[in-house]
Image (cartoon, rainbow, N blue to C red):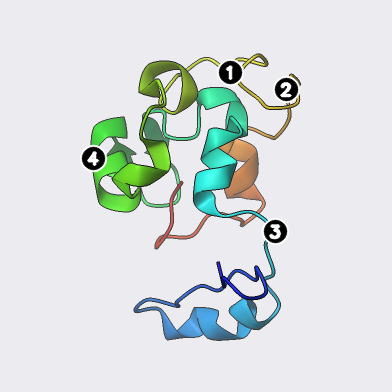
Amino acid sequence: RNKTNGELTFARGEDDSIQPLLRDFHPNRTPEEVLRAGAFGGTYFRPISSAVTNVEYSSSSVLNDTVQPEWIFGLNASTRLISSTYRKSVNKFGVKCGGSLGMWESSGWIANSDPY
């Protein structure tokens, strides 16, 4: 987050094809803010079997590989990050929202480079 204007920016990493998409991507929350607000009812980093990559992912390896420790410091991982059960009470707004992994995959919103 830019300290002057609050704008969020993202590096494209090694995937050059994503650069055009980033020009139109203007999120209003950081990943840490999303996780602390109880995104996906605490299920975001649950174990998954991806139909896109044909790989089974474990919560611990994905958390270690993709999340900066300070983003989740102090959070109860079992209820706020890696639960297999959606909990409305974890969501900041107390509601169930979002679709299943299968819905996201069949809509083309999940890529090999980012299976979660």
| Crowd tier of the residue under label 4, counting other residues whose Cα lies within 10 Å: few below 14, some 14–19, many 20 or above | few
Q: Which residue is mark 1?
A: 86
Q: CA distance from mark 3 to mark 1?
A: 24 Å
Question: Mark 3, mark 2: which one is toward the viewer?
Answer: 3
Front residue of 12 and 50? 12
Do the numbered discs 3 and 4 sit on residues whose CB atoms are within 8 Å?
A: no
Residue 56: horizontal and vertical position, in percent?
A: 30, 37
Q: Describe the element under mark 4 as helix, strand or loop.
A: helix
Q: CA distance from mark 2 to mark 1?
A: 8 Å
Q: Is residue 40 above or below residue 67?
A: above
| Residue 96 image label | 2
- What is the three-letter code of the residue carrying label 3? Asn
Q: Does label 4 or label 1 sit earlier along the sequence?
A: 4
Q: Quadrant of the N terminus?
A: bottom right
- What is the three-letter code of the residue carrying label 1? Tyr
| Crowd tier of the residue under label 1, counting other residues whose Cα lies within 10 Å: few below 14, some 14–19, many 20 or above | many
| Residue 61 image label | 4
- What is the three-letter code of the residue carrying label 2? Lys
- Which image quadrant for residue 64? top left
